[in-house]
Amino acid sequence: MSSIASKATKLSAKAKSLASRSSLYLWTFRYLRPMQIAYMVVRRVINISPRLCEHIDPQTKTGFRLQNSICPENNLLQGSTLTFLNTTIEFDQNDIDWGCEEYPKLWRYNLHYFDYLLDPDTHVDKDRILIDSWIENNPPGMEDAWEPYTQSLRIVNWIKYFATVYPNEVPQRWLYSLYQQAYYLEQQIEYHILANHYLKNGIALLFAGTFFLGDDANRWRQKGMKIILEEAEEQLLDDGGHYERSPMYHSIVTEDYLDVFNLLESNDSFNSKQDKLYIQDKCRKALDYLAMVLLPDGDIPLFNDSAFKIAPPPESLFVYGSRLIDYQLPQTAESQQIINLPNSGYYGVKNGHDMIIADFGEIAPDYQPGHGHCDLLSYELALNGKRIIVDSGVYDYQANAERKYCRSTKGHNTIMLNNQEQSEIWGVFRVARRAMPISPSILENNASVVFSGGHSGYERQQRGRIHNRSIEINDFSWIITDRIEGSGSCLIENFIHLHPDISAAIEANKITLCNADGQMCAEIIYNGQVEASIEKSEWYPEFGKRIKNSMIVFSSQTQLPFEMEYVIKKV
């Protein structure tokens, strides 16, 4: 009898697991666009392989040129070493392993991007060896090397490199390979993914279509420009932000559109003045947005999938914009500056060298939320020019514990109820049911600034169970008030992640924060309805980099509705 009961229990568990998995798939797929679903079927079921172009003699346009673009600053290629994502390998230039199967996929992608060609310190002879080796060892169809995203970045990088180093005569074998790559890419545009991948495909086709001559090139140019213009309208929001709500991807896309303007401006006879002016306007708004969200240390907040040293540094983007479109940074206000970006959902206040910025925006876009996190109502805080409270960042794009944590509610400065995520994140890039923002707003008066809002993520537990948060900014104090609507008993956990340089100590209903020199920089005063603890955590400011830090947790097993408040005071 016990054996039968055991089998029944196992079958029941399997049935529940299957039902849960099915629910994730259904809720994920319901947000996809028909185009995405159709192309998933084409790619996975029909699986038609792209064709190569036969009998080609690639010719380039006379007078093709580009202004210098942004150079990588991370010393990707030094001597006989390659470094991506904080992982370095040594290579034999006479026998390069382009497969590198023991390394993560994103690392291998970086190997095939060829960003390192644009490093001015790289020797031309080494560049020639790398390009020749890639062509010889990566025949069409090779995994990683010929995937559309890596193709897109490599096509643009090779053309930038050829325009700079070989402006008069590019070796014919390189032109032949580049032409085949563009021909191949056109047949596998990432309609199943869309978002920044689709934009990269369009930019690569535009570059190839402007660089080469002939019917294929004309078609690439027209198709690429169509994608770029359509995606500029959709992806760059009215407040200037990128619609994936990641400051890192915003920076990447800003560089993309500056590159497009560079191409259009430098090869003016091939493109319309109206298109060029439209792209220029989008670039200005994107740069203004970037300037608005930067913390006092001059770098981006780490909301959603954001980390340092992936996108170009903000300063490099501003210099590039200045060269191309005569961009000028907005004047910095001497008094406090309000951050009000309602389309992106970012709100905050800059006051001298102090700044708070919060994410009250949705996981977006609906059909491609892969770079979204459970960070609704989370924030970052800097005092005296240095980050004090931080977002956890991103470690990698692998199916592992770090990826799960970085996307989780616990990985952000917000509240979790009953150990449930705000949104149903799963896999590496998937989201099923997702929290929706509720009435984000900002109110300014003579004495303070208050931004507030809520989200619906916990209504999966109980109808009407809403998390509302307000952040009030006064002189040298930040008041965070959380109210959980609903009824019944609930475990509430409120997380605050400290920068690794900050230590914390609990004293009664007060937590003192000290900097690396042991000097007190702030204190957090909280009400007595919660228990406070300090836990060990990790901060992931760059891909492949982890730094130990501390996390404050306020917790309470209580009846709803419930309200708690803590005040951060600058010392």
Image: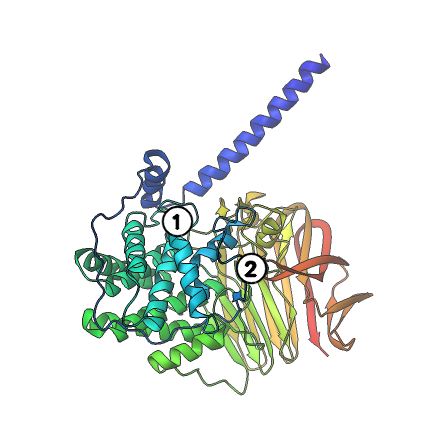
The Cα–Cα distance between marks 2 and 1, rounded to whole angstroms, is 20 Å
The location of residue 565, given as percent across then percent down, is 68, 64
Q: Residues within 10 Å of mark 1 (few under 14, many from 20)?
A: some
The answer to which of 279 and 262 lies nearer the viewer is: 262
Look at mark 2 in the image and give the residue it sits on: 85
Is residue 484 left or right of 42 when viewed as pictured? right
Q: Residues within 10 Å of mark 2 (few under 14, many from 20)?
A: some
The answer to which of 244 and 413 lies nearer the viewer is: 244
Look at mark 1 in the image and give the residue it sits on: 147
* Residue drawn at the location 73% of the way across and 79% of the way down: 571
Q: Residue furthest bottom?
A: 334
The location of residue 379, given as percent across then percent down, is 59, 65
Using the rendered view, name the quadrant where residue 424 is placed.
Answer: top right
Please tell me which of labels 2 and 1 falls first in the chain.
Answer: 2
Q: Secondary structure at mark 1?
A: loop
The location of residue 216, given as percent across then percent down, is 20, 55
Residue 544 in sight here:
yes
Is residue 560 left or right of 255 when viewed as pictured? right
The location of residue 49, given as percent across then percent down, is 31, 40
